[in-house]
Amino acid sequence: MWLNPFPRKEHGKEAVESMSLTDAQSFVNIVVLEPSFLPEGTELANVTARKETDQTRSSVRFEISGGQRALRVKQFFYDWSIPGIYADSNLVTQGKPFVWQGIAGFLGKDYKGHAAACYARWFTQVEISVLAGQFDEEELRVCCGGLVPAVPEAVQKIGQKAFALTSHTSRFHVPKWTSDDPINRVNWKAADETNPAECFHSHGHLPPIRFRFYVWDSVGTSEQPDGIEYQILLRDSENFTDCIWVWCSPKSLKSPFPEFLGYNIGKRTKWNMEIVKVEGRKVIVGKQAASVPGWQLHWEQGGYDYHIHMRANDRLRTDDVLELAARMVAGAR
């Protein structure tokens, strides 16, 4: 594996080390991915890793370059926003989706106006940007789909472990932007460390432990003046990548609802938002305006606000999404 010969660098207060992708695995909380495919005339170069500490989120970077063109690849654990619902995080507008190995990726432009792609495996978020020259869409798709674990054992040791046990936010409670964010506020536990019967006893409208191919992965709770806040992450038990985030928010938290209904709503991403009657209750249903959509659900019930976000995928259909809402509204297990 390529070993970067450049010396240790400092990015602000965060140390960045030059090392191989294999060596980087022991210093980060993600499955480090390496390319099994390199575009013609390119090679792997400039591998660096930011090591995880209690104050620093880890990341891995490298370049794929040659023939007067170059890509930058960044890998990290996206855990300071809606957990597991990462999508086209490096793109400035809604990405063009594609599916590789059953997982949605996205093509578009990044914040510097460069052609870019975004993909994910397990909890590893992958952002790719074109630094020089041109790469066509097929090359970018194959670069995403061709990423494989640098250390295969890391899939079981890290990639399949619960969000609560791998997320920097859940373990160290260090906010990325502000301390008043939902993910940092709650105390997270892995689902197998949680007693679902107690959860259902204290709150009657939680998601089922298993829904389609999703199962409870992690549970976050916090005591609020008017009830217990619940955040539950359901995770695809087959690809360990696609997730559903359920937020049961007491009214005192004043959690936001979508402001508008209609088609192609939004700036960063576009959504088709409508109100649907589910078990006699008005539910705002949002379907991403894309060929491979993400989903949102929002409603009020019993002094709580309910918000559900689903990572973009090509397996869930409208009936599936509405069934999850119906089971929660009815309190059906």
Image (cartoon, rainbow, N blue to C red):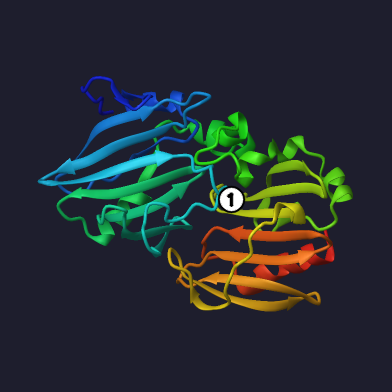
- Name which residue type carries label 1: Glu
The residue tagged 1 is 238
Residue, x 26% and y 57% (percent of image)?
113
Left or right side of 247 for 58: left
Nearer the observer, 33 or 234: 234
Name the element at disc 1: loop
Nearer the observer, 83 or 138: 83
Look at the picture and state if 45 lies above or below 205.
above
Q: Quadrant of residue 16?
A: top left
Q: Quadrant of residue 179?
A: top right
- Residue 164, image x, y percentages: 64, 36
Nearer the observer, 227 or 144: 227
| Residue projecting furthest to the top | 7
- Residue 51, image x, y percentages: 42, 25
- Residue 300, image x, y percentages: 76, 65
Look at the picture and state if 47 lies above or below 322.
above
In the rendered image, the quadrant that contains the C terminus is: bottom right
